[in-house]
Image: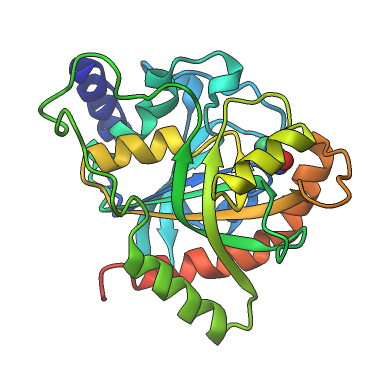
Amino acid sequence: MLQKIKQTTDFIQQCVNFEPEVGIILGTGLGNLVSDIEIVKTVPYSEIPNFPVSTVQGHKGQLVFGFLGGRKVVAMQGRFHYYEGYTMQQVTFPVRVMQQLGIKLLIVSNASGGMNTSFQVGDIMVITDHINHFGTNPLIGQNIDELGPRFPEMSEAYDHRYVKKAFEIAERNNIHLQKGVYIGVTGPTFETPAEYRFFKIAGADAVGMSTVPEVIVARHMGLPVFGLSVITDMGIGVIEKPTHEEVQKAAAAAEPRMTTIVKELVKEYDRF
Ligand code: HPA
């Protein structure tokens, strides 16, 4: 694994002479954040050795290198989901590569179903913590000691400083923000009403099919994480049957607000 990570990192460094400071994973409907990046170079996943290829509609599948808020960033336009059939190692491989490329902060975004009754469709939730409900873990197997410890601690998976900063940015820009716990599940089914209730009782505010594996791998390597989730449907009350199209639509509507927060955060990421 370590050899593969190094091989892929070397390949990318030969393609792009650019050391990113911040890595961003763009989730469902949020790929357009890329239009705010002053692009230096894009590299399609299909050209990158050891990278899986994205299969979900609405996901482009490329690494975008460039400037956002005056900072050097690398964005994953399209991520890999466990429900697509990739292994946990494949799902999280790009995060390990981005860390080797030099990123100092990982920003993750996703779409989720809300269970907190004070949430509304279209709200943006700052992720304060997560529950891994995938039934597996990307760190299962031989530990790669060069990357991190056998038993990583997860007491602050989502860095409190960035949570606080996000709320300051939101206030300055008149953006309504929520915060809460994200529970990650395999999908691809959306939840039954009983499952939404179960997750709410378990302490989760939103449920989605990504992010948790990538965050675990980032934290294993000691990489600070900031996460945003767009509430694209509600799992409590009158449940409108969620569809992939509705999820994408709600996520796209939240995109300008998400962009503002991410851009401002990136601008100041090392100044507090
Ligand atoms: N459940 C799981 N994943 C999701 C949902 C949901 O309700 N909405 C968007 N992604």
* Residue occupying the point 65% across, 42% down: 28
Residue 176 appears left or right of 181: right
Q: Residue furthest bottom?
A: 172
Is residue 121 in view? Answer: yes
Seen in the picture, residue 145 relative to 175 is either above or below; the reply is: above
Residue 257 appears left or right of 130: right
Q: Quadrant of residue 163?
A: bottom left
Q: Quadrant of the N terminus?
A: top left
Q: Quadrant of residue 56?
A: top right
Residue 176, given in percent of the width and then of the height, sits at 65, 75
Seen in the picture, residue 174 relative to 147 is either above or below; the reply is: below
Q: Quadrant of residue 26?
A: top right
* Residue occupying the point 38% across, 71% down: 267
**Which one is nearer the viewer's eye here, 57 or 171?**
171
* Residue occupying the point 29% across, 54% down: 21
Residue 111, given in percent of the width and then of the height, sits at 65, 46
Residue 150, given in percent of the width and then of the height, sits at 16, 28
**Which one is nearer the viewer's eye here, 268 or 8?**
268
